[in-house]
Amino acid sequence: MIHLNIYSPVEEIKHPLFDGKQVKVFVKRDDLIHPFISGNKWRKLKYILLKAKAENKNHLVTFGGAFSNHLVATACAAAKFGFKSTGIVRGENVQNEVLLFCRLFGMELQFVDRIPYRNKEQLFKEKFSGDDQAFFINEGGAGPEGIKGCAELMDEFDDTYDHIICAAGTGTTAAGILNGIKKQGLNTQLHVIPVLKNAGFIENEITRNIAEPANLKLHLNYHFGGYAKTDPELFRFMQSFASATGILTDPVYTGKLFYALVDLITTNYFKPHSKMLTIHTGGLLGITGMKDKISPIVF
Ligand SMILES: *Cc1c(COP(=O)(O)O)cnc(C)c1O
């Protein structure tokens, strides 16, 4: 069976800033779902794996950069649920902690140049046409199954919130949450922090299947230069936030998310007495990809 007991409690984050601005901030700890099938990656994989099983496929093939949380999540989930796995990795052959874990979970890695990597369907056809067990999973777990899995997050609350805030790469997680908000007829406003530059396009990605995205707001200025781009201010923020709250963030997604949250609260974007929920989507292995940059800042 494809099933994980989900442990993702909601906790209030106590911080003098939040008290001073009279707002209440909660966090959905999706980072606690699993150490390797982390956060939204489990939610996105769930219905993909069910589909693979339903089609009697036993070999998962997926794609990612050398620090992809999705690759390691797929490697672990494949091992746990009885699949073989292959990861197609963008760029030259490298070694790092994320790929080490992929290999420990038995994933076979193939490195592909950036240009051919762009056409994933084509690559899959070329490499796996002879393997009728091979099952294509898009980069990041994007797609309708992923959206469906992420929407389930909205079924796990006893409480309602004025605002929900999450980070976005492909926007699949945000689309799921927005679907969940609609389905339940809530007035909750969804705030999305894209981690890429020029990410206005994500709005279409998120709203494609949703008639009236009135309660969606994108905040486009918290990307720190683009995907996986950082600066010392972000690292210092991650340290001060972790030391004040006990919650670790990563430099690619959740560091930017919580930075944005704190900045928006500081500049009085949210009304006093607002109740908000941030989604901690996990991905803490991302810290290992930047340890050489982070260390000089935080030591
Ligand atoms: C992959 C990932 C995201 C991005 O999710 P999308 O559904 O692609 O927008 C956000 N946070 C973390 C920690 C991730 O690993």
Image (cartoon, grey):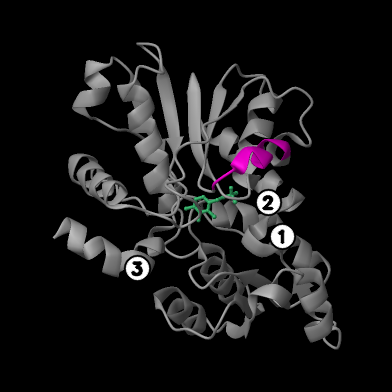
Residue contact between numbered discs 1 and 2, judged by CB atoms under 8 Å:
yes
- Dot 3: few (<14), some (14–19), or many (≥20) neighbours within 10 Å? some
Residue at the left extreme, as displayed: 299
Spot occupied by residue 264 in the image (x, y as percentages of width and height)? 38, 26
Residue visible at 55% across and 83% down in the picture: 92
Element class at badge 1: helix
Q: At label 3, which amino acid type do we have?
A: Thr
Q: The magenta stretch spans which residues?
A: 197-204
Query: Which residue in the protein does label 1 denote?
Result: 48
Spot occupied by residue 72 in the image (x, y as percentages of width and height)? 52, 70
Query: Which residue in the protein does label 3 denote?
Result: 288
Q: Name the quadrant of the N terminus.
A: bottom right
Note whether residue 87 is visible: yes
Q: Earlier in the sequence, mark 1 or mark 3?
A: 1
Residue 146, label in figure? 2
Vertical order, 74 against 124 (above or below): above
Most common SS among magenta residues: helix
Circle count: 3
Residue visible at 56% across and 22% down in the picture: 189
Element class at badge 2: helix
Q: State the CA–CA distance, disc 3 to disc 2.
A: 26 Å
Residue visible at 35% across and 38% down in the picture: 259
Q: Earlier in the sequence, mark 1 or mark 2?
A: 1
Q: Is residue 244 left or right of residue 43?
A: left
Note whether residue 158 is visible: no
Q: At label 1, which amino acid type do we have?
A: Ile
Residue visible at 39% across and 64% down in the picture: 285
Q: Is residue 132 magenta?
A: no
Q: At label 2, which amino acid type do we have?
A: Gly
- Dot 2: few (<14), some (14–19), or many (≥20) neighbours within 10 Å? many
Q: Earlier in the sequence, mark 3 or mark 2?
A: 2
Q: Kindly tell me whether mark 3's CB lies below 8 Å from ligand 1.
A: no
